[in-house]
């Protein structure tokens, strides 16, 4: 019940949403820097990026095959393959129209894939919160029932104590009445009440 309230900074909230755009923008910037340093129309550099991209795609395909396939490794390998292909084309091409077009397509694709995982994370978070809320309600209900049970037991004990006190006062008052004779009550057929006095 006493949970810490953690207010996340606004940068911490928007950083995951900006990560795909930051990643594709970083690849574009690095590719254009590479372009300015001699990669433009360089067949050797284009072949290198093609081989690296195909190798990463092959690694992703191998990681996703069979029962032992790991989706995280496969996704990482395919993302690396796409990034290498994008960097190779952006580094090889002259001018900005083709690299910007590829950047927009890559960014849209990255957001499309990320949205799927964000939805799953949101569903998991909502399911967890619902589970925690249900558990809290269940425990609060059990706590309320136990509180009511304990209070009832205390009230029953108090009532029994009050009854015993009233009975003791009645017996004391009866014994102090003038002309009280216990034998007369017994002879009349009334039940005998316990008394502390000795006959």
Image: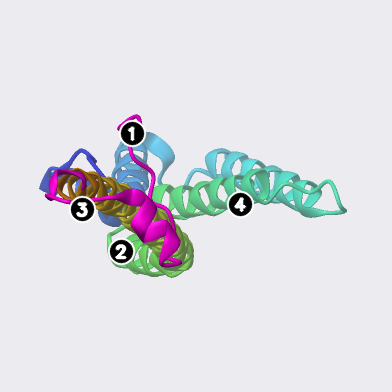
- Nearest to N terminus: mark 3 or mark 4: 3
For disc 2, the marked residue is: 100
Q: Residue at x 28, y 50 (%)?
A: 181
CA separation in Å, label 3 and label 2: 24 Å
Q: Nearer the viewer, residue 114 or 94?
A: 114
Q: Could you tell me which residue is drawn at 72 percent across and 46 percent down?
A: 70
Q: Nearer the viewer, residue 114 or 183?
A: 183
Q: Main secondary structure of the magenta part?
A: loop
| SS label for mark 2 | helix
Other residues around mark 3 within 10 Å, as few (<14) / some (14–19) / many (≥20): few
**Farthest residue, direction right:** 66
Element under label 1? helix
In the foreground, 66 or 22: 66
- Position of the C terminus, as image quadrant, is top left
The numbered mark, 3 or 2, whose residue comes first in the sequence reads: 3
In primary-sequence order, the first of circles 3 and 1 is 3
Residue 61 spot, x, y in % from top left: 76, 53
Pick the front one: 52 or 161: 161
Q: Nearer the viewer, mark 1 or mark 2?
A: 2
Residue lying farthest to the top in this orientation = 198
User: Which residue position is annotated with label 1?
Assistant: 37
Placement of 10 over or under 188, stated as above or below: above
Is residue 160 at all visible to an observer of this figure? yes
Q: Position of residue 161 (x, y in %)?
A: 27, 45
Q: Which mark is residue 75?
A: 4
Disc 3, SS: helix
Residue drawn at x 40%, y 46% as measured from the top left: 40
Q: Residues within 10 Å of mark 2 (few under 14, many from 20)?
A: some
What are the residue bounds of the magenta stretch? Answer: 175-199
Q: In the image, residue 149 lies at what x, y percent?
A: 38, 55
- Determine which residue is flagged by label 3: 14
């Amino acid at each position: 019940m006493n949970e810490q309230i953690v207010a996340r900074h606004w940068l911490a909230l928007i950083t995951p949403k900006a990560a795909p755009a930051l990643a594709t923008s970083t690849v574009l910037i690095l590719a254009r820097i590479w372009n300015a340093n001699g990669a433009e129309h360089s067949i050797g550099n284009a072949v290198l990026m093609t081989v690296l991209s195909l190798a990463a795609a092959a690694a992703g395909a191998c990681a996703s095959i069979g029962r032992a396939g790991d989706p995280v490794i496969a996704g990482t390998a395919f993302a690396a393959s796409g990034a290498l292909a994008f960097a190779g084309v952006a580094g090889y091409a002259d001018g900005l129209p083709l690299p910007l077009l590829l950047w927009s397509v890559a960014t849209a694709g990255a957001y499309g894939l990320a949205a799927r995982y964000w939805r799953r994370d949101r569903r998991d978070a909502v399911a967890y919160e619902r589970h925690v809320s249900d558990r809290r309600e269940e425990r609060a209900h059990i706590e309320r029932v136990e509180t009511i049970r304990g209070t009832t037991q205390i009230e029953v004990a108090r009532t029994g104590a009050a009854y015993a006190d009233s009975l003791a006062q009645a017996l004391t008052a009866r014994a102090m009445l003038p002309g009280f004779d216990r034998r007369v009550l017994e002879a009349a057929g009334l039940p005998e009440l316990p008394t502390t006095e000795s006959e």
